[in-house]
Image (cartoon, rainbow, N blue to C red):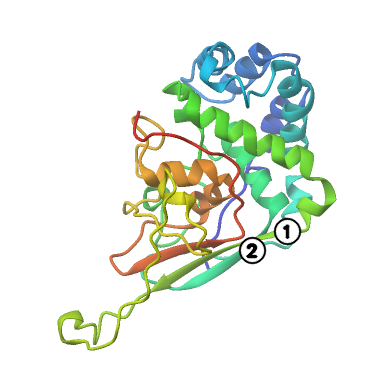
């Protein structure tokens, strides 16, 4: 059974854990240490994006201050990563391959640990165990493009999520996230000849598509969740869904590209941000 190879299972874990978990006194310090982990990656991306974010008036109402990020949220992410081996002890679910149904259950702390690893780009290696699936069958599970393309909206959403994790405490940790992959049967799906009624449709009146009160919401997707150019340009509806419900980001790590008859459903992902507009 193929599975995820986590950072603490690699030969570089001692180096990674030392650089990621040692005290970081500032955003500059974080940027420098993060860039030093990867060949060819230059510092400045994190510094520049945070500078833009903290000077952008449209984010003033919900902005996370530099002091709160450096003193509270950054150490929390570092601890999540340091505790990763314990958090994922005895966790060995298989990968979710195209055209094969199944489900994965994660604690909210496990999801937060995955997002923290994505923040520092810690899945920048062959994170899939040997078998028919390879890293090329998955979207790239990293937030690095958010920094490289200076995506301020994405940063605000991720910081809002990290703040929610920080505030959540023990009650937050008790929650679970379920990722389910379903495959529709093509045989017998003659829609034109079917006399079954359509499911009742509710039309909401909110300003955005996710303002509906329905418990189940549908968003169109690319073959790869979020697309292969995640956060690199004008945001799509699927990228926005991942950002306003950041616990959905875990699907990028476990769910290989989707077949024509596949759906991926996430249960329990909390909506943590609002937005206006679309694209840029």
Dot 2 or dot 1, earlier in sequence:
2
Which of 170 and 37 lies nearest the eye of the viewer? Answer: 170
Q: Is residue 248 left or right of residue 26?
A: left
Q: Locate residue 6 relative to residue 238 in the image: left or right.
A: right
Q: Position of residue 43 (x, y in %)?
A: 53, 14
Examine the rendered structure and indicate whether residue 49 appears above or below residue 275: above
Mark in the foreground, 2 or 1: 1
Q: Residue at x 48, y 36 (%)?
A: 275
**Label 2, residues with CA under 10 Å away: few <14, some 14-19, many ≥20:** few
Above/below status of 109 relative to 81:
below
In which quadrant will I find the C terminus?
A: top left
Label count reads 2
> Is 52 placed above or below 243 here?
above
On the image, the x and y values in percent for residue 197 come to 30, 83
The residue most toward the left is: 192
Is residue 121 visible in this depiction of the protein? no
Where disc 2 sits, the SS reads loop
Mark 1 is surrounded, within 10 Å at the Cα level, by few (under 14), some (14 to 19) or many (20 or more) other residues, namely few
Residue farthest toward the front in the current orientation of the protein: 205
Q: Can the viewer see residue 265?
A: yes
Q: Pinpoint residue 271: horizontal percent, then vertical percent.
A: 58, 48
Judged from the image, the secondary structure of the residue bearing numbered disc 1 is: loop
Q: Residue at x 38, y 45 (%)?
A: 237
**Residue lying farthest to the right in this orientation:** 170
Would you say the residues marked 2 and 1 are in contact, meaning their CB atoms lie under 8 Å apart?
A: no
Q: Which of 81 and 209 is in front in this view?
A: 209
The residue carrying mark 2 is 92
Residue lying at 46% horizontally and 47% vertically, measured from the top left: 241
CA gap, disc 2 and disc 1: 19 Å
Q: In this view, does 56 lie above or below 100?
A: above
Residue 175: image tag? 1
């Amino acid at each position: 059974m193929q599975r995820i190879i986590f950072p603490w299972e690699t030969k570089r874990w001692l180096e990674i854990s030392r650089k990621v978990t040692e005290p970081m006194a500032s955003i500059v310090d974080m940027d420098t240490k993060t860039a030093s982990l990867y060949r060819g990656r230059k510092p400045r991306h994190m510094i520049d994006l945070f500078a833009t974010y903290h000077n952008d008036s449209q984010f003033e109402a919900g902005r996370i201050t530099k002091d709160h990020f450096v003193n509270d949220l950054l150490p929390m992410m570092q601890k999540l990563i340091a505790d990763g081996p314990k958090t994922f002890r005895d966790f060995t679910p298989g990968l979710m391959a195209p055209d094969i149904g199944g489900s994965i259950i994660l604690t909210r702390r496990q999801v937060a640990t995955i997002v923290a690893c994505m923040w520092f780009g810690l899945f920048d290696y062959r994170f899939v165990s040997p078998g028919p699936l390879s890293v090329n069958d998955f979207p790239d599970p990293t937030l690095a493009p958010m920094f490289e393309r200076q995506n301020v909206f994405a940063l605000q959403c991720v910081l809002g999520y990290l703040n929610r994790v920080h505030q959540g405490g023990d009650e937050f940790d008790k929650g679970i996230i379920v990722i389910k992959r379903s495959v529709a049967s093509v045989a017998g799906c003659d829609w034109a000849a079917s006399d079954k009624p359509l499911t009742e449709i509710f039309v909401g009146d909110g300003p955005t598509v996710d303002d509906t009160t329905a418990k189940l919401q549908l968003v169109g997707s690319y073959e790869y969740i979020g697309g292969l150019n995640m956060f690199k340009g004008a945001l799509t509806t699927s990228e926005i869904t991942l950002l306003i419900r950041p616990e959905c980001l875990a699907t990028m790590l476990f769910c290989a590209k989707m077949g024509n008859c596949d759906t991926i459903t996430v249960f329990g992902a909390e909506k943590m941000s609002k937005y206006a507009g679309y694209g840029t």
